[in-house]
Image (cartoon, grey):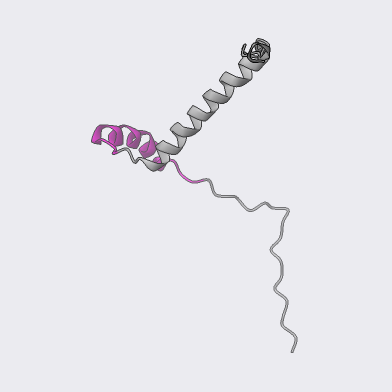
Amino acid sequence: MASDLDFSPPEVPEPTFLENLLRYGLFLGAIFQLICVLAIIIPVPKSHEAEAEPSEPRSAEVTRKPKTAAPSANKRPKKEAKKKR
């Protein structure tokens, strides 16, 4: 009776290319999500050099004059209606 038992491993088909692609893509996606979550949780101190460089382009943006919308000649201001009591 002991000779009747088959202890050989079951036959598992080899994974196809698409199965491997899906498997490793899911692993990469999980690693990317962990990195994003850790980037939110762990604060990174900013150095003075990194703060000085972005301030230069901002100063150029501040010097620009804001565009004001010119009133068009076709549109007339609406007359204010008197309140009826």
Residue sitting at the far bottom: 85
What's the residue at 73%, 53% (across, down)?
A: 74
Task: Give the percent coordinates (x, y) of residue 36.
Answer: 46, 35
Q: Nearer the viewer, residue 12 or 73?
A: 12
- Where 51 falls versus 72 (above or below)? above
What's the residue at 39%, 42% (across, down)?
A: 41
Q: Which residues are magenta?
A: 45-66
Q: Quadrant of residue 46?
A: top left
Q: Main secondary structure of the magenta part?
A: helix
- Where 71 falls versus 40 (above or below)? below
Judge left or right: residue 47 versus residue 31: left
Q: Quadrant of residue 8?
A: top right
- Residue 56 belongs to the span the image colors magenta: yes
Task: Give the percent coordinates (x, y) of residue 35.
Answer: 44, 32
Q: Quadrant of residue 51?
A: top left
Task: Give the percent coordinates (x, y) of residue 48.
Answer: 24, 36
Image quadrant occupied by the C terminus: bottom right
